[in-house]
């Protein structure tokens, strides 16, 4: 049994699935009281969405869709159930994309991630995520406060002032980007400031290579990471086992083929799609644009929710070929027109100073007629010609790439 934040983290996986999908119809019915969701989910029957298969029939909402909706229907695109004037904070991310924060403890679902990172009541936590307009600082502060930690709102920049606060308050915890933690420690060493109180950190917003984790660990700071977005709060987080990121209890996570809303087989790399149960600002099948994959089995730490590998790249692999944009959804459309094909991968190259395209298709029974038919479909869908290569099932890389742009840089 793990030192879990609550019993939800350790419930039987089958029970979790039953309880979440028993609650989902009401959550969707609540969402469609907002005009934006009513338009987006027009024709859907919330009471019928009681399984993953039923959820997968609903359309995905992309972050680019949110930005467009917000321009047409400010400030939140009609996706908010709670009126802006009833929110706790009104925030803005680069894009710009506008987000509310509602009332209530741990509104962003960050407490479990903070607890898994080792934060406990009475700890002092230094928060170097931005507080100015953007949600990052508030997301992690809310989780630390829900646990009972005191928070130093360091924010971004002002390194000298932050080090002065760290030396005086002696925080044991840090939240922020991993690279800024290293900057703080390096600057403290050069300026002969005391930053030795840090013992644990929860980081996000930037890559955490093993080399950097090892460097920080060598300085006495145990570093774990979490995965979050402004629309969803904390999606997944590491535990002390450091074997993947555990999906948060506040969401339902799917992995889908990029360019579609179609779930992939367990273990296959695809785009992360998340449904939240947030009553103020619900999200139904939000496509994050990030690639990941589900890990088999359960975490050794005792938490029983699904785990993802972590961030594995971006799902938006749009490429410009001979002046024309080619999108992942077009490759999905080509595959849908030829059920004999399994996984598809468009390889964009350069030959004799000209762009080239080769569509690689997994196929159990290749033949010349199918190859010619697929070539015609590619031209009809993309308005470009492509060579077709039919390959055995399972031979294409499991990296989530629908479009692989292999052209040399520059």
Image (spheres, rainbow, N blue to C red):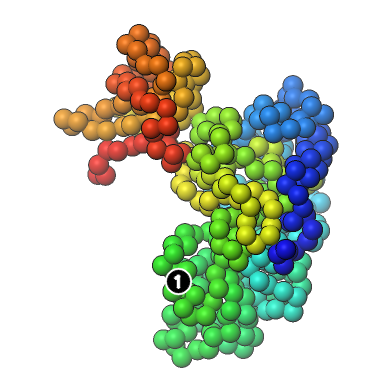
Does dot 1 land on a helix, a strand or a loop?
A: helix
Residue at (78, 35) in percent of width and height: 28
In the image, residue 190 above or below residue 9 = below
The quarter holding residue 144 reads bottom right
Q: Is residue 222 visible?
A: yes
In the image, residue 285 above or below residue 302 = above
- Please state the horizontal and vertical placement of residue 276, each as a whole percent of the image: 71, 44
Residue at (72, 74) in percent of width and height: 120
Residue at (79, 29) in percent of width and height: 46
**Number of marks in picture:** 1
- Please state the horizontal and vertical placement of residue 52, each as a whole percent of the image: 69, 33
Q: Position of 188 compared to 376: left or right?
A: right
Query: Which one is nearer the viewer's eye here, 130 or 221?
Result: 221
Query: Which one is nearer the viewer's eye here, 359 or 205?
Result: 359
The quarter holding residue 9 reads bottom right
Q: Position of 367 compared to 66: left or right?
A: left
Query: Which one is nearer the viewer's eye here, 345 or 46?
Result: 345
- Please state the horizontal and vertical placement of residue 401, each as a whole percent of the image: 42, 37
Q: Position of 180 compared to 308: left or right?
A: left
The N terminus lies in which quarter of the figure?
bottom right
Q: Which residue is mark 1?
A: 214
Q: Position of 84 compared to 137: left or right?
A: right
Query: Which one is nearer the viewer's eye here, 71 or 39?
Result: 39
Q: Is residue 27 visible?
A: no
In the image, residue 36 above or below residue 207 = above
The C terminus lies in which quarter of the figure?
top left
- Please state the horizontal and vertical placement of residue 103, each as a whole percent of the image: 80, 57
């Amino acid at each position: 049994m793990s030192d879990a934040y609550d019993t939800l983290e350790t419930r039987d996986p089958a029970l979790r699935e039953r309880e979440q999908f028993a609650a989902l119809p009401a959550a969707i019915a609540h969402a469609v009281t907002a005009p934006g969701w009513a338009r987006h989910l027009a024709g859907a029957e919330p009471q019928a969405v009681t399984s993953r298969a039923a959820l997968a029939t609903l359309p995905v909402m992309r972050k680019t869709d949110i930005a467009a909706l917000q321009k047409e229907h400010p400030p939140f695109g009609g996706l908010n159930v709670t009126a802006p004037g009833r929110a706790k904070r009104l925030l803005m991310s680069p894009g710009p994309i506008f987000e509310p924060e509602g009332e209530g403890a741990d509104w962003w679902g960050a407490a479990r991630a903070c607890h898994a990172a080792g934060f406990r009541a009475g700890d002092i936590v230094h928060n170097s995520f931005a507080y100015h307009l953007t949600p990052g600082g508030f997301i992690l502060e809310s989780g630390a406060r829900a646990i009972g930690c005191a928070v130093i709102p360091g924010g971004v920049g002002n390194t000298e002032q932050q080090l002065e606060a760290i030396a005086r308050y002696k925080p044991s915890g840090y939240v922020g980007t991993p690279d800024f933690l290293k900057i703080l420690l390096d600057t403290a060493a050069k300026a002969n400031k005391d930053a030795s109180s840090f013992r644990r950190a929860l980081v996000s917003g930037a890559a955490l290579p093993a080399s950097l984790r090892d460097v920080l660990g060598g300085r006495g700071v145990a570093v774990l990471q979490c995965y979050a977005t402004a629309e969803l709060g904390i999606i997944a987080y590491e535990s002390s086992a450091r074997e993947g990121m555990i999906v948060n209890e506040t969401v339902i996570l799917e992995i889908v083929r990029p360019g579609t809303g179609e779930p992939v087989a367990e273990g296959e790399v695809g785009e992360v799609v998340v449904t939240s149960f947030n009553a103020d600002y619900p999200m139904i099948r939000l496509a994050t644009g990030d690639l990941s994959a589900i890990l088999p089995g359960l975490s050794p730490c005792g938490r029983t929710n699904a785990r993802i590998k972590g961030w594995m790249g971006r799902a938006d692999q749009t490429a410009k070929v001979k002046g024309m944009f080619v999108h992942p959804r077009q490759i999905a459309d080509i595959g849908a027109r030829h059920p004999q094909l399994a996984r598809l991968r468009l390889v964009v190259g350069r030959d004799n100073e000209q762009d080239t395209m080769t569509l690689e298709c997994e196929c159990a029974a290749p033949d010349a007629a199918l190859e010619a038919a697929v070539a015609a479909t590619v031209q009809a869908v993309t308005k470009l010609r492509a060579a077709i290569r039919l390959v055995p099932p399972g031979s294409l890389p499991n990296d989530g790439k629908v479009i692989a742009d292999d052209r040399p840089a520059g």
